Amino acid sequence: MTFAIERTYFKPYACCRWIHSALDALLALMDDHQLSGQSIARVDIHTFSRALKLNNDTAPPTMESAQYSVPF
């Protein structure tokens, strides 16, 4: 017997899966260098082309839009 849960994955962040690697890298850098969010003025993210096709609004108008925005 196979349960449906065995054919899925769990996301550690409430956003598009394509954004997770950028978040992991950011959190690792913050931890390694004892940085707070307030001390970071800018982050440059290098990603793959399909992630650039997400809405990527800097001020998303909806929750769904926020979940698909790398800059947000």
Image: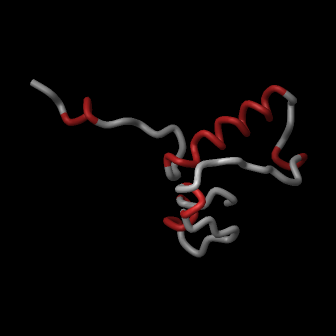
Percent across and percent down for residue 40 are 87, 48
Give the residue furthest to the left: 1
**Quadrant location, the C terminus:** bottom right
Left or right: 16 with respect to 36?
Answer: left
Percent across and percent down for residue 22 are 65, 43
Q: Number of marks in the image?
A: 0
**In front: 69, or 62?**
69
Colour style of the rendered protein structure = secondary structure
Q: What residue lies at 86% left-to-right and 37% top-to-bottom?
A: 35
Q: Is residue 63 above or below residue 14?
A: below
Give the residue furthest to the bottom: 61
Q: What residue lies at 17% left-to-right and 30% top-to-bottom?
A: 3
**Quadrant location, the N terminus:** top left
Left or right: 24 with respect to 9?
Answer: right
Left or right: 19 with respect to 6?
Answer: right
Percent across and percent down for residue 61 are 59, 75
Q: What residue lies at 62% left-to-right and 65% top-to-bottom?
A: 56
Percent across and percent down for residue 54 are 54, 63
Q: What residue lies at 86% left-to-right and 30% top-to-bottom?
A: 34
Q: Is residue 59 above or below residue 68?
A: below
**In front: 60, or 55?**
55
